[in-house]
Image (spheres, rainbow, N blue to C red):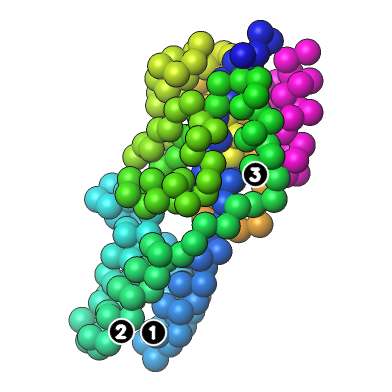
Amino acid sequence: MSQGRLTTIAFDADDTLWHNERFFRLTQDRFADLLVDYADPDHLAERLLAAEKRNIGHYGYGIKGFTLSMIETAIEVTEDRVPAHVIRELIDAGQEMLRHPIELLPHARAAVESVASTHRVLLITKGDLLDQERKLAQSGLGELFDGVEIVSEKTTQVYAQIFAQHGDGPEQSMMIGNSMRSDVVPAVEAGGWGVFVPHGLVWEIEHAEAPTGSERFFEVADLGGLPDLIARIDG
């Protein structure tokens, strides 16, 4: 176990360790095709995003909430006239997403293995419990983590609690992820390090300003740069 400044390293899952958002985008394109006679794609996308924002408090994050939001939006834009076969296709699309095999992002396994050899390693993700458990099992990375937390929301308080429970507090902990809003900003606000790993596709809800004024904020181009960054911090 590391004797340096960092003792606990946490990874986000979706679009940090494996692909996720691109499957939402493909399904959203399919959604637009199904509703092309009722709404133009840009307007439909705005309506869907509004529904997703409204429904997070009811359904949480993940594929099931996304599917229900598509159905709700379809009913709204058609003024309750959406054909039953469209609802069926939207349900089928959601189920396909839940069955989609996991594809690791470049350097994901090597980065987790490298960090796990010297530090306590956690997975902190949000979303549907069953789906996140499925993806972790299929990823082949499960045995590398000392702890797994699937939470309803990632907040400053949540990070403080997790890093206190599994580690030595946020001051000696790092969170790594592709979402500035969920992975980086609240971890830094909790007193930890936050490492941003950009991903080409980011859900609009996950955008936030980078905490550039903090000495504990870092960015790496991909997970391949993580071991060197950690070594520099540990000194």
Is-magenta flag for residue 231? Answer: yes
Pick whichever, 72 or 12, lies toward us. Answer: 12
Q: Disc 1 designates what residue?
A: 35
What amino acid type is highlighted by mark number 2? Answer: Val
Q: Return the disc, 2 or 1, that comes first in the chain's sequence.
A: 1
Q: Disc 2 designates what residue?
A: 86
In percent of the image, x 63 and y 35: which residue is there? 112
Q: Disc 3 designates what residue?
A: 108
Camera sees residue 184: no
Where does the image place residue 90, in percent across and percent down from the top left? Answer: 33, 76
Where does the image place residue 29, in percent across and percent down from the top left? Answer: 49, 76
Marks 2 and 3 close (CB-CB < 8 Å): no
Q: Return the disc, 2 or 3, that comes first in the chain's sequence.
A: 2
Instruction: Name the secondary structure under disc 2.
Output: helix
Pick whichever, 93 or 113, lies toward us. Answer: 113
Separation (CA) of disc 2 from disc 1: 8 Å
What amino acid type is highlighted by mark number 3? Answer: Ala
